[in-house]
Image (cartoon, grey):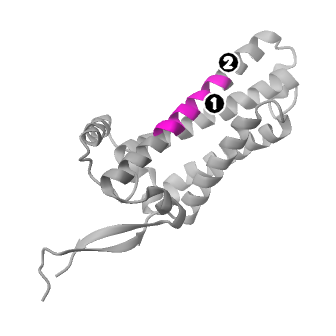
Amino acid sequence: MADSNQIGSYQIKVWDSVVRFFHWSLVSAFVIAYVTEEDVLTVHIWAGYLILALITIRFIWGFVGTQYARFADFIYKPRAIMDFLQDTLKLRAKRYLGHNPAGGAMVIALMLSLFLTSISGIGLLGAEEQIGPVAHWFNQAGGFWTDVLEETHEFFANFTLLLVIIHVIGVLVESLIHKENLVSAMLSGFKSKKTNID
């Protein structure tokens, strides 16, 4: 008879196909948009539209999706986020099957920053190129709105890149603390769940 304190584990589906498709498509679209900038404007524009579409889908999925995809599962109070970050610095952060408090906050921050990048980009397209869905708003806008929107678009694009770097560092740190490959989990959708074996 096995010791009741013996620990075993089994695989559990955490990240559904919508979350995984969203994640890796968003990564690809952001890289394409960031690298092309104004050099290949058509590609840049369509990558931006794709980002906006993906964020919209993920926002809806945050309310109607599977358990670990829902905002209710990973939006925590600021105190819980700070406590988690302090525990992470001490290398004793609690393991979560879904997003941990810092990871949940990062999801929201990235979505918001990418949304503002995309919206300001659409505005800039209308003001500078006189094309796109809001071009008619800027028929006689002059250079003022072009400058404002350009600065805003550039700021949020670079801010998003900073968030991505912080996110990658966080994933690596959590992978080391809990001895699991979080990148692999976002590819396969599965994570291991520990349980007592009776």
Location of residue 126 (image quadrant): top right
Q: Which amino acid, mark 1?
A: Ala
- Circle 2: is it few (<14), some (14-19), or many (20+) Cα within 10 Å? some
Closer to the chain start, of discs 1 and 2, is 2
Q: CA distance from mark 1 to mark 2?
A: 10 Å
Could you tell me how many numbered marks the image carries?
2
In the visual, does 20 lie left or right of 174?
right
Q: Is residue 31 magenta?
A: no
Location of residue 79 (image quadrant): top left
Q: Which amino acid, mark 2?
A: Glu
- State whether residue 11 is above or below residue 120: below
User: Residue at 41% of width from left, 43% of height from top?
Assistant: 170
* Residue 54 - label: none
**Residue at the disc numbered 1:** 157
Over which residues does the magenta segment extend? 154-166
The quadrant of the picture occupied by the N terminus is bottom left
User: Residue at 38% of width from left, 60% of height from top?
Assistant: 180
**Residue at the disc numbered 2:** 151
Residue 60 in the image, given as x and y percentages of width and height: 57, 52
Q: Residue furthest bottom?
A: 1
Residue 109 in view: no
